[in-house]
Image (cartoon, helix red, strand yellow):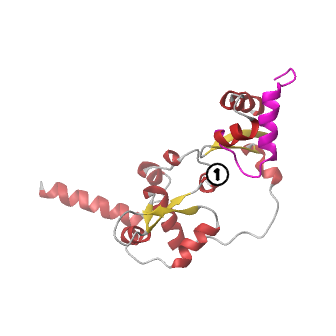
Amino acid sequence: MSEAPGEDVRAVEAALFASEDGLTVNDLTQTVGEDIDVKAVLEILAGHYAGRGFMLVERGKHWHFETAPDLAHILRRERESPRKLSRAATETLAIIAYHEPVSRAEIEAIRGVQISKGTLDVLMEAGWVRPAGRRETPGRPLIYATTPVFLEHFGLQNKRDLPGLDDLKAAGLLDPVDAAFEALELETAEGDD
């Protein structure tokens, strides 16, 4: 883009800058008009802003500008640190992320304990979890799913980027008691054979 950008590029760029939230390709098409090849323009803009102080990224099918990761420390301000999630909220968020859409009863069955309404409220207030409709079963329970804000906060492009079991073990994030119990089960199974 060493030469002056075309009107199509300028229109999409302006829409992205003016938007408070990320925009999908469909949102951009509705904003700038269907005669513009929005996908092609997004590729041009992403290439133009690559390696700069901020870059154009796609998170959960929403496009937005964000600070280059290597410069984020410059823009950080000292502020009161937000309250950390409780263990129950962290477990609930993980269950929703890996099993979505999931009902409250399913979350409780996986965790093995009941969850308070406040736990889901905290996750919804953070914008990480949303009601995703109702399950077509008796009682029609409400089901929950993660949001694009969840993906953005954790730096994920989509749900497939969530760490797998091997990644979690390698990072030391699994409970050592669980790992020891699995090893004991393997030893017992091998001894029975």
Residue 52 visible: no
Residue 83 visible: yes
Residue 23 colored in magenta in the image: yes
- Name which quarter of the figure residue 128 lies in: bottom right
The residue depicted at 43 percent of the width and 57 percent of the height is: 99
Residue 83 colored in magenta in the image: no
Residue 131 percent coordinates (x, y): 53, 64
Give the camera-side residue of 131 and 118. 131
Q: Classify residue 95 as left or right of residue 192.
A: right
> Helix, strand, or loop for circle 1?
helix
The residue depicted at 78 percent of the width and 29 percent of the height is: 9
Residue 97 percent coordinates (x, y): 49, 57
The residue depicted at 50 percent of the width and 50 percent of the height is: 162
Quadrant in the picture for the N terminus: top right
Q: Classify residue 112 as left or right of residue 74.
A: left
The residue stretch that appears in magenta: 1-25
Please rate how many residues cluster around mark 1, counting C-alpha atoms within 10 Å: few if below 14, some from 14 to 19, many from 20: some
Give the camera-side residue of 151 and 84. 151
Disc 1 marks a residue whose amino acid type is Glu
Residue 115 percent coordinates (x, y): 47, 76
The residue depicted at 73 percent of the width and 69 percent of the height is: 81
Q: Is residue 178 above or below residue 86?
A: above
Q: Classify residue 99 as left or right of residue 36.
A: left
Q: How many marks?
A: 1
User: Which residue extends farthest top?
Assistant: 3
Residue 69 percent coordinates (x, y): 72, 45
User: Which residue extends farthest left?
Assistant: 193
Give the camera-side residue of 167 and 59. 59
- Name which quarter of the figure residue 58 lies in: top right
Residue hosting label 1: 152
